[in-house]
């Protein structure tokens, strides 16, 4: 009898534990709001990230004398924390982000100055600062990118009445963008161009005078044209190498930019950069349907196959079909965000959602273009897929903000539906009362 009682007690305790876990999971699921399609895309991309990062991390693990499993568990931990960031960020009312936008923008400026002067030098660029307690590098441009789009969205929503005015409407919008881009460009030109282009696109959507936008585009093209002219004039076409640069052109990362433009413009199959060659080989081996998960061969030769060139590994293992599916996911994400922009009743939320989605999708498209050699080589990663820590978390925070806007739109639509149902019921009740009176 005692044995039976203990068994029954154990079973009932287990059942209560399982029920408790189900109840907690159900409660979390019920509290998860926002666009379910975006949630599904986030889960899908993070699963792809785990598979491809684990497949491509072998060379780094060997170099650092660590196991591939240690990097796998590290990436899983980063993703798990990133999903938690999305969850908690989407539970916050997005109007709160409007209140902290100016503070974050002000904080990001001295941080960018500090990074340029004292940041950790990795790959000949001061893009990171090391956090002392957790010994982790942090890319300040990620914070600045998020802060500037929050700030622009806030200003756009406030200045719609004077948005066509150059002094009152345009200058307060463009000057913060110029400041942020100038501070980021010396160490990370591709990110600065990405931020500037997305900001101008957002301003165009926000009804800023097109002449003012074209003026900025013209001014921004001048240094790009200068870089192309310098790259052309200082390239020896006979010996296929860069000529000796004058001292005025050797400051900062200028030689690196010149070399990348020259490789993109002049290099043939024999002279293309090593990473571009290996990326092309990976794509060629992938064919239509790929070599299969974990069967990449170029991961041992391609530099940064787990970050900058992870899309080439995706095509090698999953083929052009798999690469097209990844591209479709990002485009679907943009489409859902645009629909959200159209539905959002408040200007700040609408501008913020479309700004953050544009920057994520454009970043993804630039990474893909670099991998297939449509754009010159940059250090732009594939959002939610490339291996990362702080950059992944900032991406997750941006998605959490977009879902916060989506959650608010859902609530507004729900209230509208309830109001319409209540109005219909009231009208029906009134008609019934009138019918009864007529019968009497």
Image: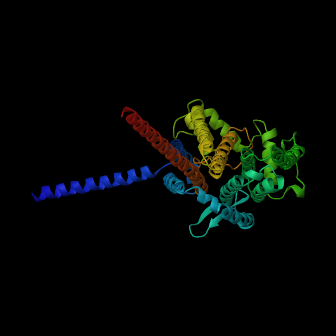
Q: What's the colour scheme?
A: rainbow
Total numbered badges shown on the rendered structure: 0
**In the rendered view of the protein, which quadrant contains the N terminus?**
bottom left
Can residue 388 be seen at all in this image of the molecule? no
368 on left or right of 172: left
Residue under the point 74% across and 48% down: 203
Q: Residue furthest top?
A: 288
Image coords of residue 297 (percent x, y): 58, 40
Can residue 163 be seen at all in this image of the molecule? yes
Image coords of residue 93 (percent x, y): 55, 56
Q: Residue furthest left?
A: 1
Image coords of residue 152 (percent x, y): 71, 54
Q: Residue furthest front?
A: 440
Residue 367 occupies which quadrant of the picture? top right
Residue 429 occupies which quadrant of the picture? top left
370 on left or right of 436: right
31 on left or right of 394: left
Residue under the point 58% across and 33% down: 319
Question: In this orientation, which residue lies closer to the viewer: 337 or 266?
Answer: 337
Question: In this orientation, which residue lies closer to the viewer: 195 or 66?
Answer: 195
**In the rendered view of the protein, which quadrant contains the C terminus?**
top left
- Up-down: is 13 above or below 194? below
Image coords of residue 4 (percent x, y): 13, 55
- Up-down: is 406 above or below 141? above
Question: In this orientation, which residue lies closer to the viewer: 69 or 125?
Answer: 125
Question: In this orientation, which residue lies closer to the viewer: 31 or 426?
Answer: 426
């Amino acid at each position: 009898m005692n044995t039976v009682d203990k068994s029954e007690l154990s079973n009932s305790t287990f059942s209560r534990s399982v029920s408790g876990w189900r109840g907690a999971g159900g409660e979390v699921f019920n509290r998860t709001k926002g666009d379910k399609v975006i949630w599904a895309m986030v889960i899908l991309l993070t699963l792809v990230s785990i598979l491809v990062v684990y497949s491509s991390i072998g060379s780094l693990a060997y170099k650092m004398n660590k196991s591939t499993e240690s990097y796998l568990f590290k990436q899983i931990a980063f993703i798990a924390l990133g999903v938690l960031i999305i969850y908690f960020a989407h539970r916050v009312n997005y109007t709160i982000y409007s209140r902290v936008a100016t503070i974050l923008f002000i904080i990001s400026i001295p941080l960018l100055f500090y990074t340029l002067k004292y940041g950790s030098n990795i790959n000949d660029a001061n893009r990171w600062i090391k956090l002392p307690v957790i010994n982790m590098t942090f890319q300040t441009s990620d914070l600045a990118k998020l802060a500037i789009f929050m700030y622009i969205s806030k200003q756009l929503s406030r200045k719609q009445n004077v948005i066509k005015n150059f002094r009152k409407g345009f200058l307060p919008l463009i000057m913060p963008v110029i400041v942020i881009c100038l501070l980021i460009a010396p160490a990370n030109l591709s990110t600065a161009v990405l931020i500037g282009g997305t900001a101008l696109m957002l301003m165009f959507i926000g009804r800023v005078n097109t002449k003012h936008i074209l003026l900025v585009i013209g001014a921004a093209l001048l240094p790009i044209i200068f870089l192309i002219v310098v790259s052309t004039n200082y390239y020896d076409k006979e010996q296929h190498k860069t000529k000796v640069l004058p001292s005025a052109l050797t400051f900062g990362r200028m030689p690196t930019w010149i070399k990348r433009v020259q490789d993109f413009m002049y290099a043939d199959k024999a002279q293309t950069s090593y990473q571009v060659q290996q990326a092309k080989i990976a794509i060629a081996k992938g064919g239509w349907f790929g070599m299969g998960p974990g069967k990449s061969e170029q991961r041992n030769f391609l530099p940064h196959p787990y970050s900058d060139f992870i899309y080439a590994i995706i095509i090698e293992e999953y083929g052009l079909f798999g690469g097209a599916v990844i591209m479709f996911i990002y485009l679907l994400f943009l489409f859902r965000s645009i629909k959200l922009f159209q539905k959002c009743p408040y200007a700040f939320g609408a501008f913020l959602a479309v700004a953050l989605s544009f920057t994520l999708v454009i970043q993804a498209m630039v990474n893909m273009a670099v991998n297939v050699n449509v754009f010159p080589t940059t250090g732009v990663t594939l959002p939610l897929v490339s291996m990362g820590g702080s950059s992944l978390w900032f991406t997750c925070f941006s998605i959490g903000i977009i879902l916060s806007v989506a959650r608010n739109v859902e609530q507004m639509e729900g209230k509208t539906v309830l109001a319409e149902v209540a109005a219909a019921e009231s009208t029906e009740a009134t008609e019934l009362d009138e019918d009864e009176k007529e019968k009497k």
